[in-house]
Image: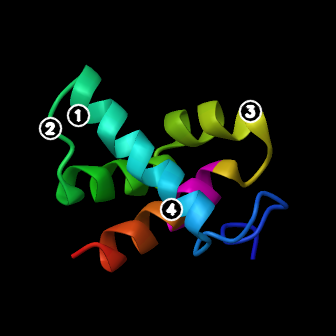
Amino acid sequence: DSSTSRGLGDVYKRQVQKQVGLLRRTITESFYPCTKEVLSALGGMYREDERFRKNIDQYGEGTAGFVSSAIVYYCEKNQ
């Protein structure tokens, strides 16, 4: 499915997961504490909220779903 593989690599790969960690750290350092709960909610919005999805998918159809899936995996893996 396009949310787990888009030619960008698999959501489970270490490189993708490192990017999710970097996103979390950047949000924390630049805006507000990005707990796993906050990150998980953001991931859900990336997939469910049309405004987020449209903005993120400008980089390729399915990118928002891919990022959302990568965030879900990150949050589950880092409990």
**Nearer mark to the viewer, of 2 and 4:** 4
Q: Which residue is mark 1?
A: 28
Please say if 20 is above or below 69: above
Report the side of 48 relative to 31 (left or right).
Answer: right
The reply to whether callout 3 and callout 4 are in contact (CB within 8 Å) is: no
Amino acid type for the residue under numbered disc 4: Gln
Amino acid type for the residue under numbered disc 3: Gln
Which secondary structure lies at badge 1? helix
In this rendering, the count of numbered labels is: 4
Magenta part of the chain: 64-69
Please say if 41 is above or below 31: below
Picture residue at 77% right of the left edge, 57% below the top: 8
Which secondary structure lies at badge 2? loop
Q: Which residue is mark 2?
A: 33
Report the side of 53 relative to 9 (left or right).
Answer: left
Amino acid type for the residue under numbered disc 2: Pro
The reply to whether callout 4 and callout 1 are in contact (CB within 8 Å) is: no
Report the side of 53 relative to 73 (left or right).
Answer: right
Amino acid type for the residue under numbered disc 1: Thr
Q: Which residue is mark 3?
A: 58
CA gap between label 4 and label 1 equals 17 Å
Mark 4 or mark 2, which is nearer the start of the sequence?
Answer: 4
